[in-house]
Image (cartoon, rainbow, N blue to C red):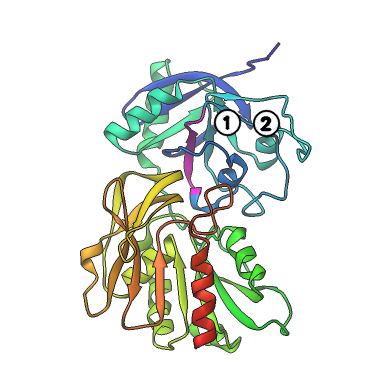
């Protein structure tokens, strides 16, 4: 018989309370409440640094059924602020499983909440937009507790997200004998980006987000990869300045997610916060050149404003089929292209992995 365990609650900024039960760590977890629609890939979600500071809700009702293994992780630790599911499986069945999700959350000190109406919560976020909240073991039905927690909810803000998820020192994968050297700027990168480059014969030099142009160029890179990452892109002023300098070198550049947004800002464009973001493995994206529609994996709360990019600078290459937001840019004034979605798509569709091949072609031509 399943043991529901200790009571826990989700309190939203609009004072809505969801009653549930605790799993993982216990205590209070403040964050921005978001949802992701992936049917699989909960391990990748939990280890994706782009979720830094967020209370992540899984819309799929059963989580944890294939357990936890270390081969599928997208980073060395979990960056989520908290985790919300309808039901978690305490007896996973998979030959690759090394444990269950409850033990994983405890080890990572992540507070979890289960047995709430995640469909109701998702509808609320879609209608109102993302908002702050807290997962707590304190009872917010007690008015004094509720008011104390709400005060902290209102004050919560995601800060220094890239600084808290980037690597602390340079990491090198592969020998100098490999054909290409690619610098991967780590804004909170998913490990499968590095793996896709390694599969194509690249020596990958992972660099902290604040690395300056002189040190980047000292490795004589054939190409530069701008990774995904968390937070508001406009907060990264020094990184944007470095990207302006990188663009003048004519080294091929490929940007993904946050890297896509930062490149736009480096060219004088704008970004905007979406009502509830795009998070999941079923986002349809239209390639404006070919007319083809691809199913993509995405995780972002901000988007590039397509018409903020001057026609002499670049052009929008992809749009989201659901809301027409910008999903890609090809630049005219530098050797760069960027996309909002995740072509590495570990735990998602593989429709757009060919973009890594295009990046390698640019290295060859350069």
Q: Is residue 210 visible?
A: no
Asked if the magenta segment contains residue 292, the reply would be: no
Circle 1: element type: strand
Q: Locate residue 242: give its quadrant.
A: bottom left
Q: Is residue 282 above or below residue 294?
A: above
Q: In the image, which disc is placed on residue 281?
A: none
Circle 2: element type: helix
* Neighbour tally class for label 2: few under 14, some 14-19, many 20 plus, Cα within 10 Å: many
Which part of the image, by quadrant, shows the N terminus?
top right
Q: Locate residue 123: give its quadrant.
A: top left
- Look at the numbered discs 2 and 1 and tell me whether their residues touch, using CB distance below 8 Å: yes
- Name which residue lies at 54% across and 85% down: 364
Whole-angstrom CA distance, mark 2 to mark 1, is: 8 Å
Q: Is residue 21 above or below residue 243?
A: above
Residue 132 at x, y = what percent? 38, 37
Residue 247 at x, y = what percent? 40, 82
Q: Which residue is mark 2?
A: 102
Q: Locate residue 257: give its quadrant.
A: bottom left
| Residue closer to the observer: 235 or 178 | 178
Residue 147 at x, y = what percent? 37, 25
Q: In the image, which disc is placed on residue 112?
A: 1
- Name which residue lies at 61% across and 29% down: 26
The magenta segment is 51-60
Query: Total marks drawn?
Result: 2
Residue 353 at x, y = what percent? 53, 61
* Neighbour tally class for label 1: few under 14, some 14-19, many 20 plus, Cα within 10 Å: many
Which label's residue is closer to the chain start, 2 or 1? 2
- Name which residue lies at 64% across and 17% down: 5
Say left or right for 292 vs 169: left
Q: Is residue 223 above or below residue 277?
A: below
């Amino acid at each position: 018989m399943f043991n529901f365990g200790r009571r826990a609650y989700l309190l939203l900024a609009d004072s809505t309370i969801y009653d549930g039960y605790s799993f993982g760590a216990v205590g209070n977890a403040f964050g921005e409440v978001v949802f992701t629609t992936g049917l699989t890939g909960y391990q990748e979600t939990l280890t994706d640094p782009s979720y830094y500071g967020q209370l992540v809700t899984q819309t799929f009702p059963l989580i944890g059924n294939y357990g936890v293994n270390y081969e599928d992780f997208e980073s060395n630790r979990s960056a989520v602020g908290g985790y919300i599911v309808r039901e978690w499986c305490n007896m996973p069945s998979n030959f690759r499983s090394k444990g269950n999700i409850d033990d994983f959350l405890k080890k990572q000190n992540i507070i979890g909440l289960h047995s709430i109406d995640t469909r109701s919560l998702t509808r609320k976020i879609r209608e109102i937009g993302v908002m702050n909240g807290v997962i707590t073991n304190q009872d917010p039905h007690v008015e004094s507790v509720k008011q104390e927690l709400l005060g902290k909810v209102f004050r919560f803000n995601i800060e220094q997200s890239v600084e808290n998820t980037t690597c602390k020192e340079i990491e090198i994968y592969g020998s100098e004998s490999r054909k290409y050297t690619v610098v991967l700027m780590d804004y909170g990168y998913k490990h499968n980006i590095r793996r896709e480059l390694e599969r194509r014969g690249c020596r990958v030099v992972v660099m902290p987000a604040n690395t300056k142009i002189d040190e980047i160029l000292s490795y004589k890179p054939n190409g530069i990869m701008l990774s995904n990452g968390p937070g508001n892109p406009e907060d990264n002023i020094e990184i944007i300045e470095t990207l302006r300098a990188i663009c003048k070198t004519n080294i091929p550049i490929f940007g993904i997610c946050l890297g896509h947004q930062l490149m736009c800002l480096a060219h004088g464009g704008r970004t905007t916060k979406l009502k509830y973001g795009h998070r999941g493995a079923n986002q349809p994206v239209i390639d404006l050149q070919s007319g083809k529609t691809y199913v993509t994996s995405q995780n972002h709360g901000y988007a590039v404003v397509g018409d903020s990019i001057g026609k002499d600078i670049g052009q929008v290459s992809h749009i989201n089929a659901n809301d027409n937001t910008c999903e890609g840019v090809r630049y005219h004034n530098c050797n760069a292209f960027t996309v909002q979605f995740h072509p590495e798509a570990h735990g998602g569709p593989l429709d757009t992995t060919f973009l890594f091949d295009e990046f390698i072609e640019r290295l060859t031509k350069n």
